[in-house]
Image: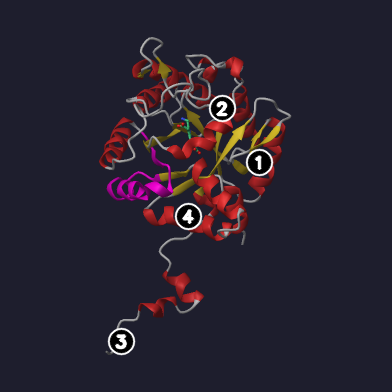
Amino acid sequence: MKQLKRPRRLRNSKAIRELCAENNLNLSDFIYPMFCHFDEGVKEEISSMPGQFRQGREYLIKDLKNLVKSGLKAICLFPLVEEKLKDSMGSYSYSESNYYLDLIKEIKNLYPELIIMTDVALDPYSSDGHDGIVDKKTGKILNDESLLVLEKMSIAQARAGADIIGPSDMMDGRIRVIREALEREKFIDTMIMSYSAKYASSYYGPFREALNSAPKSGDKKTYQMDPRNLKVALKEAKLDVAEGADILMVKPGQPYLDVVSLLARNLTQPISVYQVSGEYAMIKAASEKGWIDERSVVLESAISFKRAGASMVLSYFTRDILNYLKP
Ligand code: PBG
């Protein structure tokens, strides 16, 4: 048989492979999710996320200095909240004395160019560990009552200087409420990155350990999406666009690349993807055992997000990727 078609021609040297590459990783594609601690002099490693820490103010600021020097462009901050400040309404989330809001203010002053994304949901602040308010009698998550808290939380974060508000709560109608409030309060340039397609996933375990935010009873299946479903992702994303979201997120990442691809091909908004705590833990554990090569698996997982159509990636590996991509 005469060979006429030889796809290997385009793989024969590094130079031609580079010319033909459809996707590449840039430092500026990554958002680094970081955990802050209410005690400013504390730095604790998260046991199920080796290499990731809950850091108090002092450590976080010091850490950011180096990260920004290495090219970090964006962070997403999550607060560890003292148990005694948690209540059923999540009221500490917008309190004047909220240390997380002070921290955002301080970081914004120190690094005006660094994009700061926040998290909007009740769970870190809630004594019930749910993203919305729980009805005491029925145990149900109250949608519209929760919106009032999410609105206050968003405005408090925008006021503190957040560039991107990240509603991760999955209540119906939250994007509209937040967008209207931002406009009303004249935060016209504050962006909303909606967790549009957020699945009820078992991959969030290590994150809930990090913030001590697991639900006290029940699960999150009445608001987070059913992993069996794809079409609902497009429905949620379209609603979020109509309600005023700027960027749409898919979460988790690698098990949901079909969802990234679906949204990227059907919508014009930038798509982001969250490589969540469980994905991080799995790669870390296998590489600690010597079963996979961490660096190449991390880079391969990252490029898979770009190939699926994501413009940006939230990843706990951002710190390592900054090193890997160093020119
Ligand atoms: C809170 C929130 C969660 C994550 C991000 N924001 C946990 C949850 O919904 O239970 C998970 C992130 C991760 O696992 O890395 N609403």
Residue tagged 1: 64
For label 2, count other residues whose C-alpha is less than 10 Å away and answer few (under 14), some (14-19) or many (20+): some
Which one is nearer the viewer's eye here, 122 or 148? 122
In percent of the image, x 39 and y 13: which residue is there?
A: 135
Q: Foreground mark, 2 or 4?
A: 2
User: Whole-Å distance between the Cαs marked 1 and 4?
Assistant: 24 Å
Task: For mark 4, give the secondary structure.
Answer: helix
Which quadrant, please, contains the N terminus? bottom left
Q: Is residue 283 visible?
A: yes
The residues colored magenta run 245-271
Marks 4 and 3, the one that precedes in the sequence:
3
User: Whole-Å distance between the Cαs marked 2 and 4?
Assistant: 27 Å
Marks 1 and 4, the one that precedes in the sequence:
1
Q: Is residue 69 magenta?
A: no
Which quadrant, please, contains the C terminus? bottom right
Q: Foreground mark, 1 or 4?
A: 4
Residue 212's mark? 2
Does the CB distance between marks 3 and 1 fall below 8 Å?
Answer: no
Residue tagged 4: 301
User: Whole-Å distance between the Cαs marked 3 and 1?
Assistant: 55 Å
Residue type, numbered disc 1: Leu
Residue type, numbered disc 3: Gln
Marks 3 and 1, the one that precedes in the sequence:
3
In percent of the image, x 37 and y 54: which residue is there?
A: 308
Task: For mark 3, give the secondary structure.
Answer: loop
Does the CB distance between marks 1 and 2 fall below 8 Å?
Answer: no
Residue tagged 3: 3
Task: For mark 2, give the secondary structure.
Answer: loop
x, y percent for residue 56? 68, 30
Horizontal placement of 300 versus 143: left or right? right
